[in-house]
Image (spheres, rainbow, N blue to C red):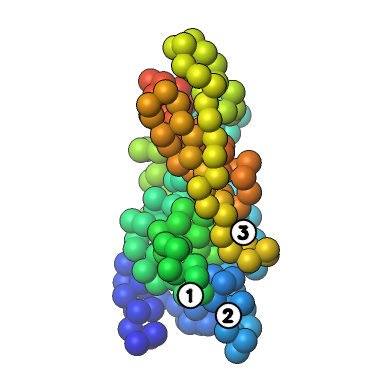
Amino acid sequence: MKQRAFKTLEKRIKYRFKKTALLEAALTHPSFRYENGTVSEDNQRLEFLGDAVLGLLAADVLMQKNPQAAEGGLTKLKSAITSGSALAERARAIGLGEHLRLGKGEAASGGADRGSNLEDALESLLGAVWLDGGLKAARKFFENHIFQTAVNSEPVIDNPKGMLQEYAQKKGYAVPDYRILEASGPDHARRYCVEVTVSTYAFRGEGTSRREAERMAAEKAVNSMIPDAGRSPAA
């Protein structure tokens, strides 16, 4: 069953692993390793590598495709491509969540579709492709499954909480109210879900800390309520 699932995912991403152990590790959430003593590795180390590879490839591809762009414009585009929400959406597009190995508690609480889990898994998968197939394979994976988010990604906001509060004040609304809906996971892998309420509207964000979750919620609110907030040029 495991090998069949691997083949399904490999077909979707158009890459076949020579070392399937790398793919298995990329799909293993820390909660699964925590609950299964025989599992020796999760995707945290691959995520660390994948994050670095992602930054390198994003900078390289953007430099080549935008030869006239200034540093500021490139930085905004890079942030849009590598943002957590963009990565989570690309992970959903390839059905990555259905292949994640999660602990029972994490799975029961909707971990297969949790944005932070999908973001981490996609970075881990990129790191695994880099180790298995090298630069050429990783670049192809990046261009096919990550870079395209630059065209349709939401604008990146430098200070979404501040912008949201300023907007609320201008509209005569009460100060945006943030509250934790859920704090789950073991100490080494905490996950927070926060909801921000602005007037009659509510938006949710997730993250590995309350601060990150609040920022994600505020960014969703800003992108939804303020037209063209922080809009950057297309890739």
Mark 2 or mark 1: name the one nearer the start of the chain: 2
Of the image marks 3 and 2, the number of the one nearer the N terminus:
2
Image side of residue 163 versus residue 99, left or right: right
Instruction: Please report the residue visible at 58 percent of the width from the left and 80 percent of the height from the top.
Output: 35
Q: CA distance from mark 1 to mark 3?
A: 15 Å
- Residue 93 figure quarter: bottom left
Q: Earlier in the sequence, mark 1 or mark 3?
A: 1
Estimate the spatial distance between the alpha carbons at disc 3 and disc 2, rounded to whole Å.
Answer: 15 Å
| Viewport quadrant of the C terminus | top left
Mark 2 = which residue? 35
Which dot marks residue 41?
Answer: none
55 horizontally vs 133: left or right: right
Above or below: residue 28 compared with residue 172: below
Q: Quadrant of residue 165?
A: top right
Residue at 35 percent of width and 38 percent of height: 152
Q: Are marks 2 and 1 in contact (CB under 8 Å)?
A: yes
The secondary structure type at the circle numbered 3 is loop
**To which residue does mark 3 refer?**
190
What secondary structure is found at the residue carrying circle 1?
A: helix
Q: Quadrant of the N terminus?
A: bottom left
> At label 1, which amino acid type do we have?
Lys
Q: Residue at x 40, y 72 (%)?
A: 99
Position of residue 36 measured from the top left corner of the image (x, y, whole percent): 57, 84
Which residue in the structure is indicated by mark 1?
A: 104
Residue 23 x/y as whole percent: 49, 75
